[in-house]
């Protein structure tokens, strides 16, 4: 599998054993949970709508920051 991935010009990066400190998704979950607490959705329908709205608040800049915070190298292309 590695050969096929590298043949496409991609690089394989392995994650360490699970640690929330090194997992960028934890930053996204944190931002989403903060948003959900603020809007106080109390019904299933309101919660589903709030999750959609909350996900829309996550930006590419947020994602870059979370990856950088977790120690992932960012190339000039991804900055």
Image: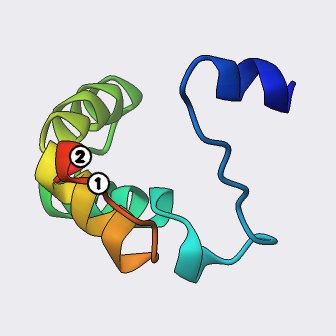
Give the quadrant of residue 44: top left
Q: Are marks 1 and 2 in contact (CB under 8 Å)?
A: yes
Pointer 1: what residue? 75
Colouring mode (rainbow / by chain / secondary structure / one colour): rainbow
Q: Residue at x 55, y 66 (%)?
A: 23
Q: Position of residue 29 (x, y in %)?
A: 41, 58
The numbered disc on residue 78 is 2
The residue under the point 59% across, 17% down is 8
Q: Quadrant of residue 74?
A: bottom left
Q: In the rendered image, is residue 46 in sight?
A: yes
Q: Is residue 65 left or right of residue 44?
A: left
Q: Is residue 52 left or right of residue 79?
A: right
Query: What numbered label is drawn on residue 3?
Result: none
Disc 1 is placed on an element classified as loop
Q: Is residue 58 above or below residue 32?
A: above
> Pointer 2: residues within 10 angstroms few (<14), some, or many (20+)?
few
Residue at x-position 56% and y-position 75%:
22
**Nearest the camera: 49 or 65?**
65
């Amino acid at each position: 599998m590695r050969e096929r991935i590298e043949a496409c010009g991609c690089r394989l990066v392995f994650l360490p054993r699970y640690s929330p400190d090194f997992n960028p998704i934890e930053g996204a979950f944190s931002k989403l949970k903060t948003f959900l607490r603020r809007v106080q959705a109390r019904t299933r329908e309101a919660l589903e709508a709030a999750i959609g709205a909350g996900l829309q608040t996550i930006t590419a800049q947020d994602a870059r920051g979370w990856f950088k915070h977790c120690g992932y190298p960012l190339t000039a292309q991804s900055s």
